[in-house]
Image: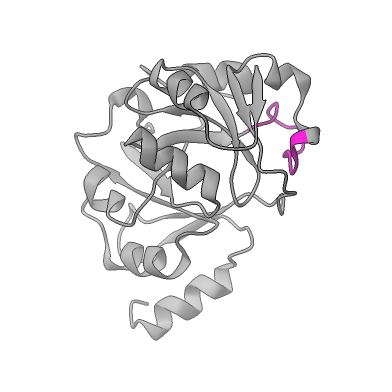
């Protein structure tokens, strides 16, 4: 495992080889693989010791990813993305044929989030595709808010770990399901609250 304070060729090479890397996001440190180069997110489940019934969201670098990888996108999803991206909001939509079966949820959906933070967005842009990402901690353990908080068991199983030297807020993203119709369903509340979402959609005349 190699630690560096900038997006490095080593991290890109590892992702392109289908390996998992650790990198900072605007919320917590993430553990991810390239959705184009890894055959599945299986390695993430193994490293994290996480149930395979829990889908892993994708980090993307633009709102256009909703159309690139989703279908039947409701207006509310675009409004939410335009307001809260980049930021701590994961939007679940119906997936189109560009999403490999191995990365689909059991309902045929995919969650996407455009993160803040230079390292994460730079990695996605250089890679040219989303990064399937989960928090870099053993399932059930606390999120890593700084590089020093990363568990050795996790670090020992990745090729590269990136750090920006900053302490993260430590709160996972809010998750909304926009695959069920125009009205989004809140699945997990983070710093973006249910009230924030309801207020925005009311102003947009979508609820």
Which residue is at the front of the view, 86 or 1? Answer: 1
Looking at the picture, does residue 91 appear above or below residue 141? below
In the depicted view, which residue is nearer to us: 55 or 14?
14
Relative to 159, say whether 203 is above or below.
below
Magenta stretch, main secondary structure class: loop
Q: Quadrant of the C terminus?
A: bottom left
Q: Give residue 147's quadrant in the image.
A: top right
Q: Residue at x 43, y 35 (%)?
A: 131
* Residue 179 percent across, percent down from the top left: 33, 52
Residue 103 location, x and y as percent?
Answer: 37, 28
Vertical comparison of 124 with 35: above or below: below
Q: Kindly identify the residue that appears in the image at 55 percent across and 21 percent down.
A: 45
Can I make out residue 41 in this image? no
Q: Nearer the viewer, residue 18 or 13?
A: 13
Q: Residue furthest right?
A: 148
Q: What stretch of residues is rendered in magenta?
A: 136-147
Across and down, in percent, residue 186 comes to 51, 58
The question of residue 198 being in magenta is answered with no
Q: Is residue 146 magenta?
A: yes
State which quarter of the image contains the N terminus: top right
Taking the spot 69% from the left edge, 14% from the top edge, the residue there is 156
Residue 108 horizontal side relative to residue 122, left or right: left
- Picture quarter containing residue 163? top right
């Amino acid at each position: 495992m190699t630690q560096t304070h900038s997006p490095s060729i080593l991290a890109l090479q590892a992702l392109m080889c289908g390996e998992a890397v650790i990198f900072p996001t605007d919320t917590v440190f993430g553990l991810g693989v390239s959705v184009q180069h890894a055959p599945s997110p299986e390695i993430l489940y193994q490293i994290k010791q996480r149930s395979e019934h829990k889908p892993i969201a994708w980090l993307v670098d633009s709102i256009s990813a909703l159309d690139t990888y989703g279908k039947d996108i409701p207006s509310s999803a675009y409004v939410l993305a335009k307001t809260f991206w980049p930021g701590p909001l994961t939007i679940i939509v119906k997936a189109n044929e560009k999403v490999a079966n191995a990365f689909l949820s059991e309902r045929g959906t995919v969650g996407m989030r455009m993160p803040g933070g230079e390292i994460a967005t730079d990695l996605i842009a250089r890679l040219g595709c989303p990064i399937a990402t989960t928090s870099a901690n053993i399932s059930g353990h606390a999120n890593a808010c700084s590089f020093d908080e990363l568990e050795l068991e996790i670090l020992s199983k990745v090729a590269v770990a990136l750090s920006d030297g900053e302490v993260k807020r430590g709160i996972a993203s809010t998750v909304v399901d926009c695959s069920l119709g125009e009205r989004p369903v809140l699945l997990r509340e983070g710093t973006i609250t249910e009230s924030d979402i309801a207020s925005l959609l009311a102003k947009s005349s979508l609820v």
